[in-house]
Image: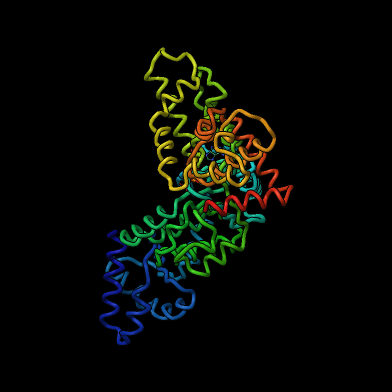
Amino acid sequence: MTTLESNWEKTLNIFGHNFEDKVIFESIITLLKAQEVNSHELIATIEAEFNVPIVSEYADELEKIYNEITDSHIKLTIMSEEAYLKQHASTNTPVHFEDHLRPDFTFTNFVVGNSNRIAQNASLAVAMKPGAAYSPLFIYSNSGLGKTHLLNAIGNYIKEKKPHLQVLYSTSEQFVNDYISSLSNHTINDFNFRYRNVDVLLIDDIQFIATKESSSEMFFNIFNALQNDNKQIVISSDKPPKDLKGMENRLVSRFTNGLTVSIDTPEFETAKAILRKKIEIEKVDYPIDEEVLDFIASHFNRDVRELEGSLKRLFFYKVVTGQEYDHINMECALEAFKEDYHTTINTAKNEELSVDKIKKVVAEYYNLSVQQINSKSRTSNLIVARHIAMYLVRNLIESISYIQIGKEFGGRDHSTVMKACDKVEKNMKKDPNYRKAVEEIKSKLV
Ligand SMILES: Nc1ncnc2c1ncn2[C@@H]1O[C@H](COP(=O)(O)OP(=O)(O)OP(=O)(O)O)[C@@H](O)[C@H]1O
């Protein structure tokens, strides 16, 4: 406890001892907090503006007690916390505190494709004109698809273009921890000051705060204060606002008031472009075959974190095998991913819905044999059936790769499988009879 806090506590104790109305004392006067003191003034604050006139009636008495304890001649000023924070903000600018941004998560390092274009465009719009039109910007997606990267990119961009603006990045978990420790350390005003005096607040993984009642109340107040001052808020989450279980309705409705965008799993071309970008960032100085990038982009594409992890694994494998490979080819990649690759093969075989079953059902539907589906024959009816079978395998068997499907269909190349799947999707869009046939076959399988 500081000297000011202890003198103030003594002041309140003495005052309370002589004060008859215990209700007023305990429910209002004890809420007064001494904020700061200098040679001529002591500032005490109380939470709500409407309490100020009530406690001000006792200001003279409190001032007298404080001066007696400290042997001083100081004037006591009472104001609301809100007014104090505002005054503090205007007399203490510029205030600089850690922004917690990751400098490597920039727009330049973020690869844009169909899966994330809208989220990237919205983020850039916010970064160019913070606080203007889209606050809050709410970005949601599954894990590892670039939310944290975009939040940081917004912050880094604003810091570069408008260095006078105060940016703060925080996970909601950090927010809750900061709040709890500010309560136990009696530094709630510092906490408030820090979060309420930013121009751009970037809150990652908001879902964590949903069930934390008092933190969520505090977040609500900060959110409102920033919105009222036209400050920019960007929030990320693993689900859209309406699906945030446990989150108060009033917060959900505020989240939906701004702009909500989502990020999807990267499609093949974006996944490959991300791999190229990561290779460029890592400054890899040996060639990597195109086929290898195709392999990773089609096999480890659940999210970008998985893509990155696979690439790291490949680099590591190249390092440990020393001179054995002067560049990374498919042979090297298959060795590096041997374990995952076999796991996928086994998973596919163990599934109740197996590749063989899909082939059999498709073959029966078209009155063909499984051997014909696997064969090299390019008769048009066989090609149609083969493509549909490949498409269904890819869509119905979780985590099977294009490479693996190619192997299962008579040792075909993964790019043939990709083209086949693409063709089926396009045909389904433009030909209702074709779509009906695919759906009928599918209904026999699931
Ligand atoms: N489009 C992209 N271009 C380049 N890198 C990307 C892209 N999307 C994601 N990444 C990278 O993938 C990794 C994971 O991304 P990030 O941490 O932003 O995901 P997230 O959606 O916030 O995940 P979580 O929900 O688990 O927090 C990071 O290293 C990030 O740089």
User: Measuring 44% from the left and 55% from the top, which residue is drawn there?
Assistant: 172
In the depicted structure, whether residue 199 falls above or below residue 9: above
Q: Quadrant of residue 395?
A: top right
- The picture places residue 384, in percent across and down from the top left corner, at 66, 39
In the depicted structure, whether residue 25 falls above or below residue 88: below
Q: Is any part of residue 181 visible from this angle?
A: yes
User: Measuring 67% from the left and 52% from the top, which residue is drawn there?
Assistant: 436
In the depicted structure, whether residue 376 falls above or below residue 201: above
Q: Considering depth in this image, is 167 or 242 the residue closer to the camera?
A: 242
Q: Residue furthest right?
A: 430
Indicate how the structure is coloured in the image: rainbow
- The picture places residue 1, in percent across and down from the top left corner, at 27, 60
Q: Considering depth in this image, is 338 or 304 the residue closer to the camera?
A: 338
In the depicted structure, whether residue 379 falls above or below residue 80: above
Q: Considering depth in this image, is 437 or 74 the residue closer to the camera?
A: 437
- The picture places residue 351, in percent across and down from the top left corner, at 43, 45
Q: Is any part of residue 199 visible from this angle?
A: no
User: Measuring 36% from the left and 83% from the top, which residue is drawn there?
Assistant: 24
- The picture places residue 308, in percent across and down from the top left corner, at 48, 34
Left or right: where 72 falls relative to 266: left
